Amino acid sequence: MIARNGIGPRKERVGELNLTRRRRMPPWLSLICRLTLALALMGVALAVNWASRADLRDTADGTVSFTDVLYFTVITITSVGYGDIVPISERARLLDTLLVTPIRLFVWLIFLGTAYDFALRRIGERWRMRAIQHSLSGHTVVIGYGTSGAEAVKELIRRGTNPASIVVIDPHEAPLDAARACGVTVLHADAARNVALEAVHIARARNVMISAGRDDTSILIVLTARRLTPSVPISVVIRSEDNESIARQAGANTVINPASFAGLLMAGAAHGPHTADYLTDLAAVDGRVSLNERPAKPDEIGKPLATIRTGLGVRIYRGEECFGFWQQGARHIEAGDLIVEIVPDENREPAND
């Protein structure tokens, strides 16, 4: 519910919020290119008719001026002419047949193409995006396209995620323009409202990433998202340490504090120059090693975590419990376990779309 001009609240429906994607060329640039091409073709026809004006006859006064040639060119290209100015020689008729007529067809195709692009195509694009909106499933929802959100999207793409499977929600148009440039689907809306999250079918999402810029806004979005989807993993960026526990209580599975993480890197660098380098290596997609999370494979059941061959196993998540590689629970892998491992770059599994 939102207020408009003090009149009162207005209820918005899900269908009023439409997803958009980047167009290959801005509409204004496409229109300028089409008009330029049409004028260029008409200029060619005008030059040809002016050069052969001696082969034209004006039935009104018998003389053919530049104005007459311009009139004859425009009328001939846009229609079949009125017969007041006519070609009287075979050369003029051949020029009209072999040159002016193809130009006429091209100009009409430009006009029809412009009408299609700015009317029918937009209607079709709107229908297509609505179809995509209704079929969204297994996608990643990124809420807030600031510094953290933009880096998250770029990292997902670098890790192999299809940009078409990423939906960015932001209340401001400028960040969405930058998001469109990455090829992702965007929604201009306030994600703290149910209608926005329902529009992207958050209940069918693979995961949700929230970085709204303000802790109070991010926590409100977490509450809204968790009420709509009790099981989808939610990660959120929180800048104040005091708000981290509140974000977890609101329903966030993962709470990330950029300042705390930066502090960890700096402290690690103080005790050893290679610690921060290795942590950065793990976090970045272009590092020599990376962290990989995957379900346990059937042939690993019953074996110790240390024996897996896909990487260096460091943790097992079993339901709500977490076991490090040194703990008793990591000595026997069970069905349904999630394994966190350190793998070389060439062994990293591609992201699922």
Image (tube, rainbow, N blue to C red):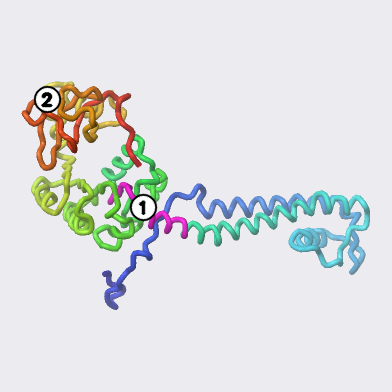
- What quarter of the picture does the C terminus occupy? top left
Task: Using the image, determine if residue 72 lies above or below residue 180.
Answer: below
Q: Which residues are magenta?
A: 127-144
Q: CA distance from mark 2 to mark 1?
A: 46 Å
Q: Position of residue 212 (x, y in %)?
A: 24, 51
Task: Using the image, determine if residue 178 lies above or below residue 121.
Answer: above
- What quarter of the picture does the N terminus occupy? bottom left
- Callout 2 environment at 10 Å: few (<14), some (14 to 19), or many (20+)? few
Q: Position of residue 157 (x, y in %)?
A: 35, 38
First in sequence: mark 2 vs mark 1: 1
| Location of mark 1 (residue) | 136
The residue lying toward the viewer, choosing from 1 and 295, is 295
Give the residue type at disc 2: Ala
The residue lying toward the viewer, choosing from 224 and 99, is 224
- Judged left or right of residue 32, residue 343 is left
Q: Which residue is drawn at the image coordinates 27% and 31% (left, top)?
A: 284
The residue lying toward the viewer, choosing from 265 and 314, is 314
Task: Using the image, determine if residue 283 lies above or below residue 129.
Answer: above
On whether residue 137 falls in the magenta region, the answer is yes
- Judged left or right of residue 143, residue 82 is right
Quadrant of residue 332 in the image? Answer: top left
Give the residue type at disc 1: Leu
Q: Position of residue 80 (x, y in %)?
A: 80, 63
**Residue 149 can be seen in this image:** yes
The residue lying toward the viewer, choosing from 88 and 142, is 142
On residue 270, which mark appears?
A: 2
Front disc: 2 or 1: 1
Q: Which residue is drawn at the image coordinates 34% and 50% (left, top)?
A: 137
Q: Which residue is drawn at the image coordinates 81% and 50% (left, top)?
A: 48
Task: Using the image, determine if residue 274 lies above or below residue 28.
Answer: above
On whether residue 133 falls in the magenta region, the answer is yes
